[in-house]
Image: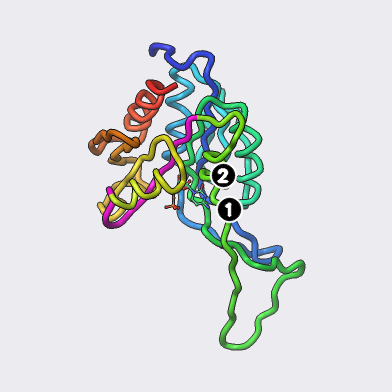
Amino acid sequence: EQPQILTGKTLTITAGPTREPLDPVRFISNHSSGKMGYALAQAALELGAKVNLISGPVTIKAPAGANLINIESAEQLLNESLTYAAHSDAFIGCAAVADYRAANVATQKMKKQGDELTLTLVKNPDVVAAVASLEQSRPYTVGFAAETQNVESYAKGKLKNKNLDMICANDVSKSGLGFNSDHNALTLYWHNQSLELPATSKTEIAHQVIEQLAKHL
Ligand code: C5P
């Protein structure tokens, strides 16, 4: 039994990919497994928090005791995130949100045409930045940054530009870590400090992230 350092606190965590529909049978998505977000939810529950887990479609099971909210698109993720964030002490944006969606979603299945097809995409809302800019009931807001190069400068840029309180950066070019893996290594950045969390299981690193977060609540 772990020290219940998050008793009385509510965390909202986003996880998994989004699906951006093109027509009734097709979508744009990514390979996010949801493992990191689900591990964070599990760790927060074990430390006594109430957890809202807003999740895109994944194949893993939600931790027992989490309030699971299923979403598909980034716009659905935004709506649910703003609803739950305003009643949360902390918000962790761990979802792999599609950066773009189709400008127009066809109401009927698109028919095969010529040799080329051009899709027009429009930018999706930035969910974690929208939460961080809440004027009332703004939770302590945490983002993730998956980078393949210049990890520190890109992560610090996102911390600042998205107005986050903390960002968890990982170098996804390192094989066996990050996307879809059971292991991860992170560097946590705040505006005035940083902390290296060396490679370990997502379960263990999730505990370390939540313990660091708890110090700020
Ligand atoms: O800008 P980038 O996608 O690298 O930032 C990653 C962080 O921003 C993650 O915390 C991710 O959940 C969040 N994000 C978001 N909405 C988007 C894109 C990213 O909340 N449309």
Specify the principal SS of the magenta part: strand
Farthest-out residue, front: 135
User: Which residue is pictured at 58% across the width and 57% down the height?
Assistant: 124
Q: Please give left or right for residue 8 compared with residue 172 in the image.
A: right
Asked whether the residues under the numbered discs 1 and 2 touch, taking CB atoms below 8 Å apart as contact, a structural biologist would say yes
Tell me the residue that label 2 is attached to. Answer: 130
Residue 150: % across, % down: 26, 55
Q: Please give left or right for residue 134 compared with residue 212 in the image.
A: right
Q: Give the range drawn in magenta.
A: 140-152
Secondary element under disc 2, as helix, strand or loop, is helix
Secondary element under disc 1, as helix, strand or loop, is loop
Residue 23: % across, % down: 69, 66
Sequence-first disc among 1 and 2: 1
In this orientation, which residue lies closer to the viewer: 9 or 58?
9
Residue 134 is marked as: none
Tell me the residue that label 1 is attached to. Answer: 125
At label 1, counting other C-alpha atoms closer than 10 Å, the crowd grade (few under 14, some 14-19, many 20 or more) is: some
